[in-house]
Amino acid sequence: MRASGRLLAAAAWVLVGIVCLIAPAGTAGAEPRSVEDSFELAVDVYTEGLNTGQRDARLDAFRRAQRLFASLAERGVRTPDLYTNLGNAALQAEDLGEALLAYRRALLLDADHPRALQNLAHARSLLPSWVPRPEPAGVLDSLFVWHRGVPAPQRSLLAAGCFALAALLFATAIRFEQGALRTAALLPALAWIAIIGASVLDGDGDAQNAAVVTREAVARAADSSLAPSAFPRPLPAGVELRILEERDSWVRVRLANGRDAWLQASQLSRVAL
């Protein structure tokens, strides 16, 4: 009896070992969801939130949808529609800072995206009345906003390529006295001027320096948690500002009304992707 009991115990341990070996292998072999499936799941969870009456359950659904859309962006799916959907989920989840950030990123990729523009305006209206808001885009903003979705290194490379092509065509036109080549050289030359002009004239609107407060923050008069508050009240999530200077874990920022202050870098996120 004792021998049979020992045999049974040994067999049980062997079975446990086999299960432990099989389970990780099965998990590791599971294929991740495709982008299309992940997007459909995010939309389904968002729709579930819209159809849920109970507040806590509704917020939970929207937060799950927000995480799902955010994970798609982390996987490299960076489109105006995706960021607009992310902003909508964050807004419904009462995460105003992340909603404004997502809408700004959508407009970084497509400055005329209608849903992002409309929803950004709505999100801004939810901020306290004392919070300064950016001025609406002017004519120059509309003319020179196109390049913001292109990273600076690629812009520099594109500008250099246009300049080199224009110089080559001009030189060839002069060498062989070809008027057609001289005319053709105008196109890359104008493209080079447009890229350089956009980068220079866009100035303060450069998304590399644009940021959004993503969680309530006490703005300080200096880069220290012991410095006095710069404003009577903390800045709520969703305040849009511009980064002027970085110093260790602190950043000096400028609000839309021109007031400067210091915030901890962890309290805001850059709009730049």
Image (cartoon, rainbow, N blue to C red):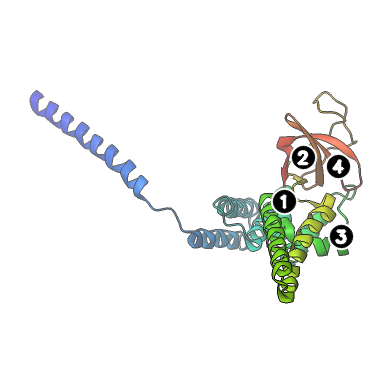
Q: Is residue 267 left or right of residue 11?
A: right
Q: In this view, which residue lies farthest toward the bottom?
A: 180
Q: Residues within 10 Å of mark 3 (few under 14, many from 20)?
A: few
Q: Which residue is mark 3?
A: 136
Marks 3 and 2 in Cβ contact (< 8 Å) = no
Across and down, in percent, residue 232 comes to: 90, 36
Q: Nearer the viewer, residue 48 or 172?
A: 172
Between discs 4 and 2, the one toward the N terminus: 2
Q: Label 3 is placed on what type of residue?
A: Pro
Marks 1 and 4 in Cβ contact (< 8 Å) = no
Local secondary structure at mark 4: strand
Marks 4 and 2 in Cβ contact (< 8 Å) = no
Q: CA distance from mark 3 to mark 2?
A: 24 Å
Mark 3 or 2: the one toward you: 3
Mark 4 or 2: the one toward you: 4
Q: CA distance from mark 1 to mark 4?
A: 17 Å
Residue 263 visible at all: yes
Q: Nearer the viewer, residue 228 or 19?
A: 228
Q: Which residue is mark 1?
A: 101
Residue at coordinates 52% horizontally, 60% vertically from top-left?
41
Quarter of the image that includes the N terminus? top left
Q: Nearer the viewer, residue 163 or 105?
A: 163
Q: Which residue is mark 4?
A: 254
Residue 103 visible at all: no
Q: Residues within 10 Å of mark 1 (few under 14, many from 20)?
A: many
Q: CA distance from mark 4 to mark 2?
A: 16 Å
